[in-house]
Amino acid sequence: MANPVHIDGSHPPQRRVRLSRGLSPRNSRRREAVQRALVRATTFVVFAVLWQLFALRADSLLIPSFTETVSALVGLSANPEFWKALLVSNQALVIGFGASVLIGIPTGLLIGRFRTLERVTDPYISILLVTPMAAIIPLLVMSVGIGLASRSLLVVLFALPMVIVNTRAGVRQVDDRLIEMARSYNADERQIWSRILLRGAMPSVMAGVRIGLGRGITGMVVVELLMVSVGLGGLILEYRAFFRTADLYAVVVAVVLEALILVSATYRLERRLVPWATSETRLA
Amino acid sequence: MRWYKTTALLVALLLVVAACSSNDDAASTTTTTGAETTTSVAPTEPDPADVSFTVAVVEPDIASVPILAAVDALVAAGYDVDVVEVAEPELAIDGIARGEFEISGETISAALVAIQLGAPITNIGDVVGNAWTFYGRDDVAQCTDLDGTRIGIFSEGSVATAMIRQWVAENCPEIEADYLVIGGSDVRYQALVAGEINATALDLGEGLLLEDEEGQYNLLADFSKDLPELRPSTIYANADFVAESPEVVQLYIEALLEQHVRINEDPAYLADLAVTYLGGDLADWELVASAYASNDLFWAAALTEENLAYTIAFFEDAGVVEPGLTPADIAVLGPMRAAEVVVVGG
């Protein structure tokens, strides 16, 4: 390739061009995966070392070191009490998050499609988004009690607004011209929904599900810290009362790991349901 | 490949630094101070210019109101005393251990656990006596009625929980009840009123409020009468601060004792303090203040080797602490005794 020349006759600075090494697509993907794994591993090691240094420096009753936490996490995994607590906590998560998805997605779709409905519901969704949930807990106790129902309801209050808002946004961002085009081809409302709106909104719906799941997990633990201390929240408070901070942090790490696994599962589900959107994201 | 080498070098460097730090700090653990129970204390008040300390208060309530008044009196006298409010006793304990605060006071069980872990903390006085009660709903009139019911507790390690468990073990050991941990006292109160739990521990003030509620509630146990030797709420301080500045500790206890003398002479004074520092209706506080004063619950110099030994044994039996603690391990009483002599005479 000849060196380019500006119109004024000057030469632009030369860039070093990396030539293809002739790697096959398969080897190229493998190499990228190794690079990604290496970056993640390095980041984790740096984080672990910084945590260790900070804990040793702080010398605090409330901050265990990284190694103490890892040791406690290993011990926790062999503790039946932990698995029982995990099961109890996840009962509220499954019921609450499941209800949030079953209620939130249809609600978000309808609100996104019909402006009148949006105007009616918008203030209540905004209230749910901004209200501090800790203030609602005494009301929950008085009205629903302190059992699984109230814990599940609080998970719903945490997760539902996110599912609705993102689903609504997904419907709203579908190009109106596509709907006009469909109508021009005599598509009925059902066809508009199935061929255009649902497919177009699905990436945002899945994003809402993912964010709602994260919020739901937060709600699952918060209600156990502030209302009735069962499950993982109960373990956290018990360990805190006895200054078993390594065990406390191990429970928190376990919650984070659970959240990562579940969010990863939603990504896989999204790739199955919306393969065109995820491949576009990759190309971008 | 250059960035790989750079990254590997950075990680190796961090690991070396971490190893060096861990070698240097491996022995840097908080150490137990062998606290003495007697201390010779200077009789003269310290110079205000030489006094500066911070008091951590955990969720101010009727029991900690005299502390706030004592601090204000010290400030008015020219001493540099700050008050910091923290949400949980564990935060106060950690702050004391690290020297961020010099003095605090709340549940003794958290302090005992921390002392046993090697934290440099020691008890120097009493916040309030045993003001706990155990109430049941109308269907729970005696211990055996608790069988198959739900009892609300603050936490597994709390003083009130230990008292309830001991009371049940002594009066109806055969029953089986579900102990539900409900952290917030207001949530626990609401749960009792709503019938979600059948019994719970309440302090004197909450008990009086409950008796005003609709429906019948039964006082199952009054721990201020059943366990008067137990010291559930004490003043604790950083052990190094106590060793270096016993005269300041004495000054603080004197200020608190002066408040307690006034409260015991006139309970209405406590009600006034409660309105000043906590807000609310004076008439409501007068009822609560009268109950506290009539039970002789306020005396900062109430700690003795005997009641501390009793308290330690109580928490050992409850499984909150491991056996082995002694009063000398957990308290320095010299400044407290000297303060009592100054305030009320020898």
Image: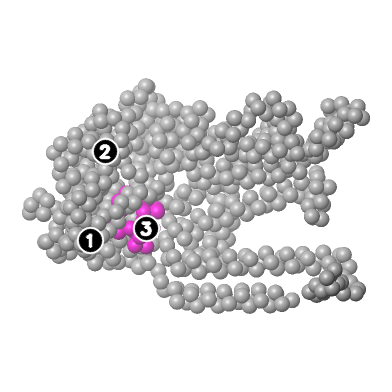
What element does badge 1 sit on? loop
Whole-angstrom CA distance, mark 3 to mark 2, is: 27 Å
Tell me the amino acid under the disc marked 1: Val
Q: Position of residue B174 (x, y in %)?
A: 41, 38
Badge number at residue A280: none
Tell me the amino acid under the disc marked 2: Thr
Q: Position of residue B299 (x, y in %)?
A: 19, 46
Front one among A26 and B219: A26
> Residue farthest to the top?
B214
Q: Is residue B6 left or right of residue A273?
A: left
Q: Is residue A167 visible?
A: no
Q: Quadrant of residue B2?
A: bottom right
Residue in view at x 55 percent, y 45 percent: A221
Residue B100 covered by magenta stretch:
yes
Instruction: Please give the chain letter of the residue carrying mark 1.
Output: B
Whole-angstrom CA distance, mark 2 to mark 1, is: 26 Å
* Residue that label 1 marks: B51
The reply to the same-chain question for discs 1 and 3 is yes
Nearest to N terminus: mark 1 or mark 3: 1
